[in-house]
Amino acid sequence: MSTDTKRKTRRGKRGGEVKRQKDSAGAISAQVSDGAPAVTTGDAYVAPPMDSASGSDALFYIDTQAGEGSVEAAAEKISPASYGLVNPDLQKYLKSCEGMLDEQKFGSAEDRDMFINNVYAEMKNFELQLTTDHEASRILEKLFWISNDYQIKRYFAITREDTIRLAVHRFSSHAIQTLLLLSAIALEREVRGEICDFARAYGDDDDDEVNGAQAVRTKLPTFEELVLGLAETLTPHWSYLMANEYASHILRVLLLVLTGNPIEDQANHKNSIKSKRSTKYMEDRNGAPAHHQALASKRSVPDSFGPALDKLLRTASDEMSDLAARGFTSTTVGSTVLQSMIELQAQRSSIEYSNSLLDKCLMGLISDKEGNANTRRDAFIKMMIEDVAGSHFLQAVMKVCSPKLLQKIYDKYFRTNLKALAFHPIANFVVQSLFSSAKTEQQLKSMIEGVAPMIGDLLFKNRPGVVRALVDSCVRLEAGYFEIINGLYNGLGAKSPVERNELINLLAFLIPHSEFVNSDYNRLQFKLQGSLIIQAILQFPSEGLEPLMASYFSQDPEKVFSWCKDPSGSRIIEALLKSPQVPANTKRRAMEQYITRYAELAMDRCGSHIVDACWLVADIPFKEKILRELVKRETQLQDN
C-alpha cells in the first residue's frame, strides 16, 4: 500500500466513513507475471511488440512482461469500454419508457410483452453503447428485471463481445451484474428442465423469414454456457479485476452464482451484494428491489459449475503473487472478493498448506511450522488487526480456519496484548470474532481466563460486545458456563450472595453493584448489549441458568412487570419464555406473575409480544385464564 494513503482509525458503524483507497499498487501488482523478463534498453523499460499478443483481433493487450516499477502502465492497457454518446432521440425514448417500467400498469400480459419487445427493438444494434451511459444503464437495469429469459440471454450474449472493458466501466458493470443476478434465477429453472413461455422475440434482419410474416428466435447459448464463459473470460485477469472498484462486485456475484449460495441476505444487510447507497438509489426511483426472493435462498446449479469453480479458485490463487495477496487484505475493494475466495476454498478443500492463498495473505504463517521469529510478518499482521479493511479479512479467516491456526494467531498476536486490542476502536471487532470463533472447549476457557480480569472495564467502558461474544461461544460450544458467570460476578462487583441476587439487574442496566444500590431504580435505562447478554445466558443448560433465574425471581414483581413495557426489557422476558432450556414449571411460575394484567400487557406495543409468548407455552387451563381476562376487556382491546 502506498505510504501516501491515509488510514482512518474508524470505519462505518465502527466510528466513521472511510475514504475509498485509490492507490492499490500492491493489489494491482498481481498483473505482473513471473515469466520472461521485460525488454530493456539501458535503464528504460521498453514494452514488447504488440504482435506478441494472443491473437491479432484482441480487444486489448496486457503486457505480462512489465516489471514491478511499471505496474500502473500495465494496468492502463485495460481501459473502460467507450462507444460514444447515445443518440439523443434514443435516450429521450428510453426516458419516456421509464415511467411505464416504474408503474408497470399494463392492460394485459400481451400489452406488457409488446411494450418490452418494442423497447428492445428500438435498442437494437446499440446495446453495448447503452450500457455505458449513465441514465440508459439505469433504465436498462429496470428493463432487465421484467424481461423474459430469452431477452436476458440475448443481451448477456451480446456483452461477451467486450466483457472485460464493460466490467471495469462505471455504469456498464452494474448492467453486467444485474444480468448475472437474473441468470442465477433462470439457471435453477434451466436445471429443472422447465420450458419458459416466451413472448415472440424480435429477430435480427437475417433471422426473419422470407415473407417477413414472423420473426424467429436466434439460437443462443444456455445460461450455463454464458456463466461458464464469463468465468473463463474473467479468470486470466482475476487479480486486476479484484483491484477494480466496479469489476470486483461482478466477481463476488459470479462466485456466489457458481456455488448456488444465497446472493442477497434479507436478514443481514452486511451480506448483501448491493451497497446501502445503491439499494436506496433504486428504491427511490421505484426500481426493482435489491433483495429478490429467489436470490435469498439456496439454488440448484448445473454439475459443471463445481469443477469450474474449483479451477477458477485454483488458477486465481496460484497466479496471484504474495505481494498482491497481501495488498488485497488491506484494500476495501479487493478484500471482499478475497474473503469470498478464502471461505469457498475452506468449504471445498483445504486452505492451510504451504504457499496457499491464505498462507500468502498471512506472509507464510501457515508454512512456518517451527514458529520462527519474523518481525516483518508480525508487524504486518498487527497492522491488519487495527486496519479498516484488514480487520474484516482477519474476521473472515477466523471463522473458517482450523483450531490449530486459530490458537497460533491467538498466542502470537492477542494473548499478551488483549486489553489494548479489546479497547481499540477497530481491533475490538477482531477480538469479538476471535472469541466467537473459538473451536474447542479448551480454547474457550483459555480465552475466558484471559479476559476475566477486565470484564468489568469491558462492560462499563463501551465494550460489552467482547463479553457477549464469549457468552455466545459458551452457548455454541456448550461449555464454560461457570467460568463466564464467575467472571461476570467479579466484573459487576457482586461478591456476596445478597449482591449476586441482583445479577439480572446489573446486567440489564450494565451498572456495577456499588452504583446500583445508590441509584433510583425508576431512572435506570436498559442497555441493549446487557439485554443481549442475558438473552444468551438464558440459552445455558439448567445448571448454568440457575444463578440468573434465582436473581430473576428475587425481584419485586412490580419491577419485573415494568420490564414488559420496555423494548429491551421485554426481550428478556420473551427469551425466558421461549428458551428450550428453561423448565416448564419455571416458565409457568413466571407467567403467574402477570395474572390479572394480561389485558394491560395486550394493549402495550411491547407487552403484547409477552402475551403472545405466554400463549405459545401455556397449557390449556392457563390459556383459559388468559382468555377469561381478555374477554372482560374485549371492548378496550378491539379499540386498541
Image: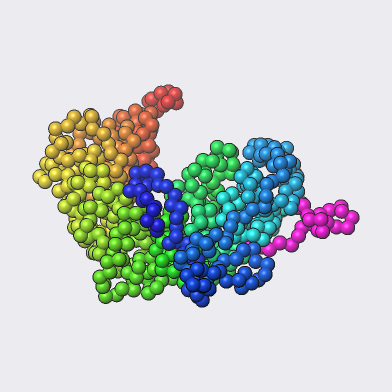
Q: Quadrant of residue 477?
A: bottom left
Dividing the picture into quarters, in which one does residue 393 lie? bottom left
Res 194 visible: no
Tell me the quadrant of the picture where the N terminus can be found: bottom left
Between 346 and 545, the one nearer to me in the picture: 346
Whether 207 is among the magenta residues is: yes
Residue 621: give x, y in percent of width and height: 34, 39
Q: Residue at x 32, y 69 (%)?
A: 365
Q: Residue at x 22, y 57 (%)?
A: 417
Q: How many numbered circles are shown?
A: 0
Above or below, comparing residue 52 to residue 171 in the picture? below
Magenta stretch holds residue 294: no
- The residue positioned farthest toward the left in the image shown: 496
Residue 26 lies, with reference to residue 579, above or below; the image says: below
Spot the residue most to the front: 42
Predominant SS along the magenta part: loop
Give, as a single range, the part of the protein colored magenta.
200-227
Residue 55 horizontal/vertical position (percent): 65, 71
Q: Position of residue 381 (x, y in %)?
A: 31, 61
Image quadrant for the C terminus?
top left
Up the image or down, 627 lies above or below 490; here it is above
Percent of width and height locating residue 591: 29, 38
Vertical arrangement, residue 595 with respect to residue 431, above or below:
above
Q: Which residue: 82% across, 59% down?
A: 206
Examine the rendering and report whether any part of residue 292 can be seen. Answer: yes
